Amino acid sequence: MATKQTRAGAGLGAQGLARVALLGIGLYVAVDIVLRFLRPQYSLVYNAESDYGRGPWFWVMDLNFLLRCALSIALVAALYKTLRMSRQVRVGLGLLMVWAVGSGILAFFADDVEGTPTHGSGTVHLAVAVVSFIAMAAGGLVISVKLRSDPAWRPAASGLLVVSVLGVIALLIEGRLTGHHAPGGLFERIFLGLELVWMGLVAAFIARRRPSPDVPAGSVSAGP
């Protein structure tokens, strides 16, 4: 059985990781804003965020992909240290890790700019992005549903579920938009914004909550 000192250390670790995730989210948004001014020719409505990874200042977008990977891993680790482990939680965290790793992989495969043929590196980028986005949407939804049954998360669970459902809707709309003049970039940004809000809410809740003295972090639940 875990000692009180071990549980306290795990709680502090979760809070520290959550703060790292919050800082990463803030930096990620700031870099996206900077890229908007560095590459003003790209449309927020029609161009995907990944288009910043081609041409001048491509390395800034690549660093932001790696930052998204790092902050997402920090959040997954914070959740692992905070939640009771169950099948549903493991699935949710696994999906969030797919999103995290996929975000990092995107830095190494530049996309093909909106309106140009997709091939080579752009094909890999698109495939990884699709898998990562679906994993994030599904993982956030799975975790949010699970948190509704956790009394400790009751103050945040309903809001997290609403944000995760809106993220799924935004992703479905984005997936149905095709063609050069479709506002895919806009709905991609709405989706990413909602997922960043979801991650920020989770991280903020973990960062300010007190660890339970009765439940070891990352303990296994008897539930499904």
Image: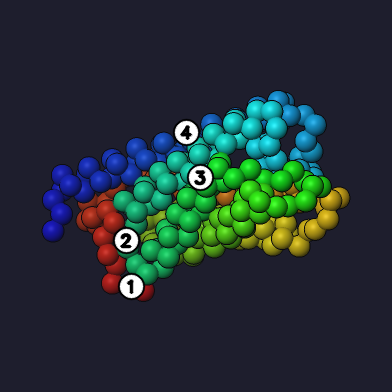
Q: Residue furthest front?
A: 120
> Would you name the residue on which mark 2 appears?
84
> Would you name the residue on which mark 3 appears?
104
Q: In what element is the residue under mark 2?
A: loop
- Give whichever of discs 4 and 3 has the lower sequence position: 4
- Give whichever of discs 1 and 3 has the lower sequence position: 3
Disc 1/disc 2 C-alpha distance (Å): 9 Å
Would you say the residues marked 2 and 3 are in contact, meaning their CB atoms lie under 8 Å apart? no
Q: Amino acid at mark 4?
A: Leu
- Give whichever of discs 2 and 4 has the lower sequence position: 4
Left or right side of 150 for 26 = right
Would you say the residues marked 1 and 2 are in contact, meaning their CB atoms lie under 8 Å apart? yes
Camera-near label (4 vs 1) is 4
Mark 3 neighbour class, 10 Å CA radius: few under 14, some 14 to 19, many 20 or more: many
Q: In what element is the residue under mark 1?
A: loop
Q: Amino acid at mark 2?
A: Arg
Measuring from the top left, give residue 99's x and y in whole percent: 51, 53
> Would you name the residue on which mark 1 appears?
223
Would you say the residues marked 1 and 3 are in contact, meaning their CB atoms lie under 8 Å apart? no
Mark 4 neighbour class, 10 Å CA radius: few under 14, some 14 to 19, many 20 or more: some
Would you say the residues marked 4 and 3 are in contact, meaning their CB atoms lie under 8 Å apart? no
Disc 2/disc 4 C-alpha distance (Å): 25 Å
Camera-near label (2 vs 4) is 4
Using the rendered image of the protein, determine whether residue 161 is visible from the camera's viewpoint.
Answer: no
Would you say the residues marked 2 and 4 are in contact, meaning their CB atoms lie under 8 Å apart? no
Q: Amino acid at mark 3?
A: Gly
Left or right side of 56 for 67 = left
Camera-near label (4 vs 3) is 3
Using the rendered image of the protein, determine whether residue 73 is visible from the camera's viewpoint.
Answer: yes
